[in-house]
Amino acid sequence: MNRKITIVGDSLAQWSNGFGLKQKLPSEFTVTDLSVAGYSTEDWLQNKNRLNEIPTQIWILELGTNDAMVYGTSGYETRTRSLIDFLQNSQNSIVYLTLIPRTNLASIRETIRTNNETLRQIKSQKQNVDTIDVETFFESYQGDVPLYPVSDPIHPNQIGYEIMGELYRKKILGI
């Protein structure tokens, strides 16, 4: 049985090559990455008809950094719920919400933390919605190499992307 996964994200996902999931998952999974740099939940709501074009059993929503920069916490819950409702009403599917890393950009760290709490609340209130807690893993990371390059406080380096891909892989496979 072929299981279809679609990633709906921003530059964090787009620049990661779909978190390497095409290589990390068994052949019965098909991964499509629709991520667009600069997109927020609002942008995806405005372009939601693109999402109906791909039959999907598992949606990975990796959004939040641009929301934090543009909107702060204002309207984040409403926009996220609207996007989840659209995905679940158009197809019988599971939605994985990414608790995004807080980044090394101090001006949005607290906003991301607050928005991630909102995602935790949404998960507790909606069926077929789960979270992938990248935030906690990044915050507790003790490795010798930092997860962000000095030149970019928002996008992780290859180690960070590898960690994210493994977290997604484990969640999808239930391990």
Image (cartoon, helix red, strand yellow):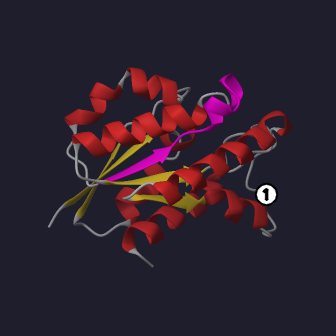
- Residue name at image x 70 percent, y 28 percent: 69
Query: Residue 104: where, in percent of width, then height?
Result: 80, 44
Query: Residue 29: where, in percent of width, then height?
Result: 26, 62
Residue 62 forms part of the magenta stretch: yes
**Which quadrant does the N terminus fall into?**
bottom left
In the shown orientation, is residue 31 left or right of residue 137? Answer: left
- Visible residue check, residue 152: yes
Q: Residue furthest left?
A: 1
Q: Residues within 10 Å of mark 1 (few under 14, many from 20)?
A: some
**Which quadrant does the C terminus fall into?**
bottom left
In the shown orientation, is residue 154 left or right of residue 106? Answer: left
- Residue name at image x 45 percent, y 56 percent: 20
For this rendering, which residue is in front, 96 or 143? 96
- The answer to whether 69 is drawn above or below residue 113 in the figure is above
Q: Residue furthest right?
A: 106
Query: Residue 3: where, in percent of width, then height?
Result: 23, 60
Report the magenta residues as a range: 58-73
Which amino acid type corresponds to the residue marked 1 in the rendered image? Pro
Q: Residue furthest front?
A: 125
Residue 42 forms part of the magenta stretch: no
- Visible residue check, residue 9: no
- The answer to whether 43 is drawn above or below residue 103 in the figure is above
- Residue name at image x 22 percent, y 66 percent: 28
Query: Residue 79: where, in percent of width, then height?
Result: 50, 31
Image quadrant in which you'd find residue 112? top right
- Count the marks: 1
Q: Which residue is mark 1?
A: 146
- Residue name at image x 64 percent, y 36 percent: 65
- The answer to whether 173 is drawn above or below residue 48 in the figure is below
For this rendering, which residue is in front, 150 or 34? 34
Q: Residue furthest bottom?
A: 175
